[in-house]
Image (spheres, rainbow, N blue to C red):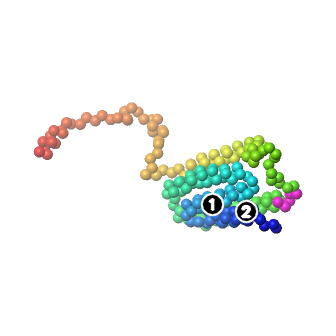
Amino acid sequence: MKFDSLTFLFYTFASVLVISGLKVISTKNPVHAALFLVLAFFNAAGIWMLLQAEFLSIALILVYVGAVMVLFLFVVMMLDLDVAHLRSQFKQFLPLASIVGIVIVVEMTVVLVRGFIGSRVPMPLQTPVGESNTMSLGKLIYGDYVFAFEIAGIILLVAIVAAVALTLRRRKDHKSQDISAQIRTRKEDRIRIISMPADVQNRQDGKK
């Protein structure tokens, strides 16, 4: 195997990516896990850059590192997460999670083996003449795979709504807006006029 600078950079990025990915799921502090995920995104962007996919590399840094992960950090630091309660049922779901993980690893292995060994047709690495990498990617996403792209957007939207619904809980120190109570309100409930005796002068005389 020929060893050059590109190969060295690839193995460096890949090694750091794997180590940071393992730290994401093994670290105890959720803030540290989010920071390791940022490191994983940076190394993945480096690998995309080596594959001459500049648009994907920059989009990964700007979108995920610059927006999504910053949002994750704000949410993790603002929410009062009970880590001990979340880990209390870890052993209960460990067998099922292990089975699902093994199935995913086997499926990915089969796909990679068939892609790199079973296929005899070399994958094109260069973009067509007169097109940039961004143009070719846009044609694929919004042309050939536009239906799958829209389905992925709908799935992400449903996931966001489900995450908000699952994390929404009522707390005593949290004030929320009750739309139904606002609709049922009457003008008599907005202001109340109370008739009180004018005994201010008597109180002042008693103090003297």
**Real-space Cα separation, disc 1 to disc 2, in angstroms:** 15 Å
From this view, report whether residue 178 is shown above or below residue 186.
Answer: below
Mark number for residue 122? none
Of residues 83 and 30, the one drawn nearer to the viewer in this rendering: 30
Q: Residue at x 67, y 47 (%)?
A: 155
Q: Is residue 16 magenta?
A: no
Q: Is residue 129 left or right of residue 95?
A: right
- Label 2 neighbour load within 10 Å: few <14, some 14-19, many 20+: some
Q: Amino acid at mark 1?
A: Leu
Percent position (x, y) of residue 104?
73, 60
Quadrant in which residue 202 is drawn: top left
Q: Residue at x 70, y 65 (%)?
A: 12
| Quadrant location, the N terminus | bottom right
Residue to which mark 2 is pinned: 10
Percent position (x, y) of residue 199?
18, 38
Asked whether the viewer can see residue 140, the reply is no
Of residues 15 and 146, the one drawn nearer to the viewer in this rendering: 15
Percent position (x, y) of residue 192?
32, 35
- Label 1 neighbour load within 10 Å: few <14, some 14-19, many 20+: some
Task: Tell me the element at label 2.
Answer: helix
Q: Amino acid at mark 2?
A: Phe
Residue to which mark 1 is pinned: 39
Q: Is residue 3 left or right of residue 98?
A: right
| Quadrant location, the C terminus | top left
Percent position (x, y) of residue 161?
60, 47
Quadrant in which residue 13 is drawn: bottom right
Of residues 39 and 195, the one drawn nearer to the viewer in this rendering: 39
Quadrant in which residue 139 is drawn: top right
Q: Nearer the viewer, mark 1 or mark 2?
A: 2
Q: Is residue 98 left or right of residue 28?
A: right
| Residues drawn in magenta | 116-120
